[in-house]
């Protein structure tokens, strides 16, 4: 799909999100690039066009997008959180040197077992992050 500002309102509505101007801009920043972006990166992109968007608005909107299943949150470490517009099952490759995060197709990973779960729990998903760095 070609993600434009014109079709962002429909995407937001399809996830029960009221399409305000700022939400459309934030969604466009995420979906038009199809990249993993931090909240600060989203804010920088949005503010190149509309400098009135506050940090609180960006964080609250990203939280709303998470709650509604529009994006995934990828926590590389406590200080590095990315928002992923690809919500299909997949894993990630994190390049420690550059800070770049990319997708790994779920079909390329085989997990042979999980620890026993409490009787009242079921597995919701598995998030695998493979961390790599350049050889010295």
Image (spheres, rainbow, N blue to C red):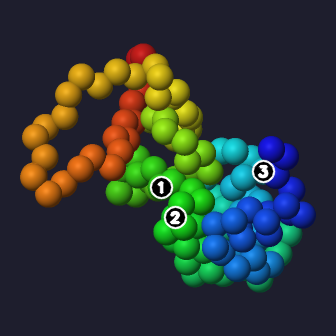
Work out which quarter of the rendered image holds the C terminus and state it. top left
Q: Residues within 10 Å of mark 3 (few under 14, many from 20)?
A: some
> How far across and down, in percent of the image, does residue 112 sit?
24, 22
Viewer-nearest of discs 1 and 2: 2
Left or right of 86 in this view: 97: left
* Among numbered discs 3 and 1, the one appearing first in the sequence: 3
Q: Residues within 10 Å of mark 1 (few under 14, many from 20)?
A: some
For image coordinates 63% across by 67% down, the residue present is 15
Query: Can you see residue 83?
Result: no
Residue bearing the label numbered 3: 32
**Dot label at residue 66:** 2
* Among numbered discs 1 and 2, the one appearing first in the sequence: 2
Local SS, label 3 = loop
Viewer-nearest of discs 3 and 2: 2
For image coordinates 85% across by 61% down, the residue present is 7
* Separation of marks 1 and 2 at Cα, in angstroms: 7 Å
> Residue reaching furthest front?
120
For image coordinates 18% across by 54% down, the residue present is 121
For image coordinates 47% across by 28% down, the residue present is 106
Between 136 and 81, the residue placed more toward the observer is 81
**Dot label at residue 73:** 1
Q: Residues within 10 Å of mark 2 (few under 14, many from 20)?
A: some
């Amino acid at each position: 799909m070609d993600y434009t500002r014109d079709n962002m309102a429909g995407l937001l509505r399809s996830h029960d999100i009221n399409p305000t101007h700022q939400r459309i801009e934030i969604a466009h920043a995420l979906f038009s690039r199809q990249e993993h972006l931090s909240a600060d990166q989203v804010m920088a992109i949005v503010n190149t066009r509309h400098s009135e968007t506050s940090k609180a608005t960006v964080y609250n909107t990203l939280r709303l997008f998470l709650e509604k299943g529009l994006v995934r949150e990828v926590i590389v470490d406590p200080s590095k959180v990315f928002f992923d517009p690809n919500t299909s099952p997949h894993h990630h490759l994190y390049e420690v040197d550059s800070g770049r995060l990319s997708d790994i197709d779920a079909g390329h990973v085989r997990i042979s077992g999980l620890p026993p779960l409490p009787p009242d729990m079921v597995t919701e998903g598995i998030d695998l992050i493979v961390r790599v760095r350049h050889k010295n």
